[in-house]
Amino acid sequence: MSLIQQIIGGDRRALAQALTLIENDDHNSQNILANLYRHTGHSHIIGITGIPGVGKSTLINSLAKLMRKRDDTLGLLAIDPSSQFSQGAILGDRIRMRDLLGDKGVFIRSMATRGVLGGLSSTASAAVDILDAAGFDRVIVETVGVGQSEVDIASNAQTSIVVLCPGLGDSIQAAKSGLLEIADIIVINKSDYPKVNLTKSYLHEMIDIGRAAQTRGSETQTTISDTHSVSNGNLDTDNSLWEVPIITTVATTGEGVGDLFEQLLAHYNHIKSTGEMTRRRNRRLRAIFESQLRKQLYTKLSQMLSEDYCLRQLEVIMEGETDPYTAATNCIKHFETNYIGDEE
Ligand SMILES: Nc1nc2c(ncn2[C@@H]2O[C@H](COP(=O)(O)OP(=O)(O)O)[C@@H](O)[C@H]2O)c(=O)[nH]1
Ligand SMILES: [Mg+2]
């Protein structure tokens, strides 16, 4: 049986093997993804983002237990954009998710990156597709941090949960980094600590400000990418109909996690019934397509130019005879002259 068939059939070892190939950016990974593509589109993809220690893994453990009660199968991915995974972090996650270990309906995987072109967000996106094709009802992606890479990774999710602690510190950081804008659900975890209400009212305020700005923006702006977009028939979908809920939880006891699960289901139904799901899917497909083009073009280009020309350019830059901007432009010119030929 081929690796593809094994993955679709739910074979764990094949699944783990495919994820390793993706992680290492193996030359086979493109082929695997291409073959799995038509088997994707059935999982509910959930993103969970927040700074280290906020309680994401503990929350996932509690949430997953509720999902398993309904017999939903789960694929869990933990992704750290900031660094290579330390063994300690993986061990920590395993302890936090101990209730799920050994359950055949749950697959857990931590992923690092090898500085692949396109970055961790394309690794994450590929991994999500593989778990989706493997047939899990829900795929949960845990991302560590609140920066731009997290926003990128979160764009793979159909439902994005942003987890914060009571106190204004990380709420302000999340607002600044644009993370609140992508949140479909906000969780204030560790609500056994003080300042829960203060945090809640700050977040409500930030959401209202964001919403007002969004409404103004959509009245006045047509962006270039909108004008040039492939017609997907629903660019004007109004997602403002979804009120971002702010849920307070204590992940360690499971308090509030039932509410979170209800909101997750409600959000999934919402995006399915309003066309928002198709809009998100199309946005994601565009991002994957563009990143594949960049990656494949770059690989091709550097193969064709590599040995002689580019290396020589690099030497010239290092000797101070030209700058890297001009050198890059020279490489493209060289490519056009030698490989594309005269257009006339
Ligand atoms: N007091 C309290 N501690 C919590 C809560 N949720 C998680 N923790 C603890 O916070 C620490 C970090 O949790 P973890 O799930 O690993 O956070 P992650 O880094 O966001 O995945 C662990 O020691 C948890 O037991 C909570 O709601 N209240
Ligand atoms: Mg964690």
Image (cartoon, helix red, strand yellow):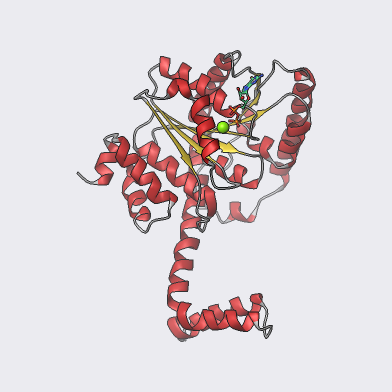
Q: Residue furthest left?
A: 1
Task: Name the residue rendered at 29%, 38% in the picture.
Answer: 8
Quadrant of the rendering where the N terminus is positioned: top left
Task: Name the residue rendered at 46%, 72% in the picture.
Answer: 301
Quadrant observed for ligand 2 in the rendered image: top right
Tell me residue 166's x, y (percent).
Answer: 74, 23
Tell me residue 14's x, y (percent).
Answer: 30, 41
Residue closer to the observer: 304 or 102:
102
**Looking at the image, residue 88 lies above or below residue 204:** below
Q: Residue furthest front?
A: 88
Tell me residue 118's x, y (percent).
Answer: 52, 56
Quarter residue 202 falls in: top right
Q: Can the viewer see residue 265 in this picture? A: no
Task: Name the residue rendered at 72%, 34% in the picture.
Answer: 211
Q: Can the viewer see residue 169 in this picture? A: yes
Quarter residue 25 falls in: bottom left
- How many numbered marks are there? 0
**Looking at the image, residue 165 lies above or below residue 343:** above
Tell me residue 136's x, y (percent).
Answer: 38, 30
Residue closer to the observer: 48 or 79:
79
Task: Name the residue rendered at 53%, 25% in the picture.
Answer: 96
> Is residue 3 rendered to the left or right of residue 49?
left
> Is residue 341 rendered to the left or right of residue 152?
left
